[in-house]
Image (cartoon, rainbow, N blue to C red):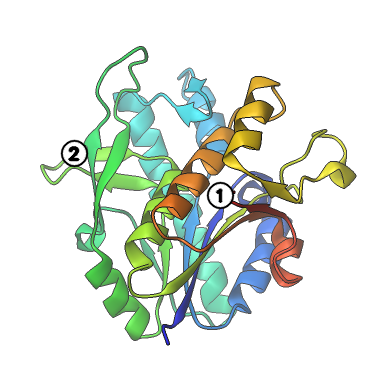
Amino acid sequence: MRDHLTIIKVGGNVVEEEASLKSFLKDFSRIAGNKILVHGGGKTATILSEKLGLESKKVDGRRITDAETLKVCTMVYAGLVNKTIVAGLQALGNNAIGLTGADLDLIRAVKRPVGEVDYGFVGDVKQINYQALNELLNTGAVPVLAPITHDGHGQLLNTNADTIASELAVAMCFDYDVRLIFCFEKSGVLMNESDEHSKISEITPELFEQLKADGIVSGGMIPKLSDGFAAMRRGVGVVVITNPAGISEGLRGTRLVLE
């Protein structure tokens, strides 16, 4: 029987607001067994970019990253946000270790080719060093991953945190029974963004396409669903989109199903 592994990607206001982050970290610290946390921090990066006079641009929830924006993302994601989370988990008795994809050669990526959109220094994941992650998990450590990867030739790359979480889940599902959870401030995917009671309990790929066409699913929710379904097609058993309360209450939220 294989061990369980919980991979949680946390983002949105849960990361950006001090009180909500502390509450989430308490829930995360109570999860038994092996676990990995992947975090975002996009709003903080946007605020700092604006203070520095840099314009923030996104396409379908994915940040366009020029050279100066990459510096900001690295400072915010790998520095302030990552170490704040690690310190919070240490205070709760979790032996967390903060990492980027460059550390231990954990995540190699390639710079996204220029197509209809030039995303700049954005990386597409090509390789996960799952052996190194296994070694960390076996010591009882809790890896906390910032969404910065590298190309193996000295170049850092900004990579969508939802994508990183789903690629990690796929890489680790050969050794573990993996649960992939996308956690943000909403209770799940909502038919009406302002109505928490409009949560959709299950989404199939067909429903996802319809919701996207109708404009109900947009922005940063698109990568979550796209990457979640991609992970399930490649062997991940459970994918859920929820909020911190949903994690502590038996994974209430929106569950992805392939059929």
Seen as rendered, the residue at the extreme top is: 116
Give the crowd class for mark 2: few <14, some 14-19, many >=20 residues within 10 Å.
some
Q: To which residue does mark 1 refer?
A: 258
Q: Is residue 194 above or below residue 53?
A: below
Question: Measuring 36% from the left and 79% from the top, which residue is drawn there?
Answer: 137
Q: Nearer the viewer, residue 210 or 141?
A: 210
Label 1, secondary structure: give it: loop
Task: Using the image, determine if residue 55 lies above or below residue 245.
Answer: above
Q: Which mark is residue 250?
A: none
Q: Would you say residue 40 is visible in this rendering?
A: no
Give residue 211's quadrant in the image: top right
Relative height, residue 202 to residue 158 (above, below): below
Q: Are marks 1 and 2 in contact (CB under 8 Å)?
A: no
Q: Nearer the viewer, mark 1 or mark 2?
A: 1
Q: Which residue is mark 2?
A: 155
Sequence-wise, the earlier of marks 1 and 2 is 2
Q: Secondary structure at mark 2?
A: loop
Q: Quadrant of residue 26?
A: bottom right
Q: Position of residue 72 (x, y in %)?
A: 40, 35
Q: Position of residue 133 (x, y in %)?
A: 30, 70
Q: Is residue 1 above or below residue 135?
A: below
